[in-house]
Amino acid sequence: MDFWGIITNVKDVSALEISMHYKQLWHIEDAFGEIKGTLRARPVFQWTNKRIIGHLVVFFLSYFCEAVITKELRKKQEKLVTKSIENKVVKQRSLAVSMALKELSSVLAIPVRIGNKRIWVRTDIRENALKVMKALNMNIPPKILKIEEEMEK
């Protein structure tokens, strides 16, 4: 049999409620672990209340965004597309946010110089990233993003 105790300054909540809330902390710790794993964030040690709150807000917003994207992908029942799945090396599975974000991060705007013009061209959007964009009702950016006239040197 295990025994444990909690010291708190909360007076208007029963001991049972406090212990039940305490036992649910693993959900928060699990969520932070998931966020830090997905975002590859390292521990950040903050000492002022303002910075601690800022740090928590950033991670909460990240977790919220990931949850929204996951919900939309599940609602649309989007499946991951990879060569190993196509070749039946691994089984078909749902598209995860981490894979989709990895592919989204590979979409770049590249400057191409033609004559006296600089044309900003979007790189190709891979299939999994495209699925996320569509699941979130995002507009697909055009292939040619911007054309600039360059000044002579």
Image (tube, grey):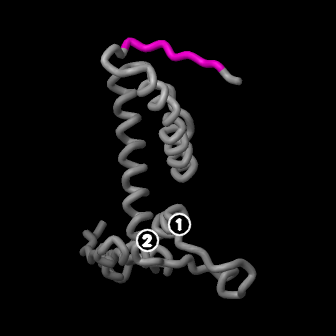
For the C terminus, give its image quadrant: bottom left
For the residues labelled 1 and 2, the Cα–Cα distance comes to 8 Å
Percent coordinates x, y for residue 146 in the rendering: 27, 75
In primary-sequence order, the first of circles 1 and 2 is: 2
Which corner quadrant of the image does residue 86 belong to? Answer: bottom right
For the stretch drawn in magenta, the main secondary structure is loop
Q: Which residue is mark 1?
A: 96
Q: Residues within 10 Å of mark 2 (few under 14, many from 20)?
A: many
Query: Does residue 7 show up magenta in the picture?
Result: yes
Instruction: Determine whether 100 is above or below 91 in the image.
Output: above
Q: Is residue 27 visible?
A: yes
Q: Residue at x 41, y 77 (%)?
A: 76
Q: Which residue is mark 2?
A: 73
Q: Which residues are magenta?
A: 3-9
Query: Does residue 124 show up magenta in the picture?
Result: no
Q: Residue at x 47, y 31 (%)?
A: 20
- Looking at the rendered structure, the secondary structure element under dot 2 is helix
Q: Residue at x 35, y 21 (%)?
A: 13
Instruction: Determine whether 3 is above or below 79 in the image.
Output: above
Q: Is residue 110 visible?
A: no
Percent coordinates x, y for residue 59 in the rendering: 42, 42
Give the residue type at disc 1. Answer: Ala
Give the residue type at disc 2. Answer: Leu
Residue farthest along the right direction in this orientation: 89
Q: Are marks 1 and 2 in contact (CB under 8 Å)?
A: yes
- Looking at the rendered structure, the secondary structure element under dot 1 is loop
Q: Residues within 10 Å of mark 1 (few under 14, many from 20)?
A: some
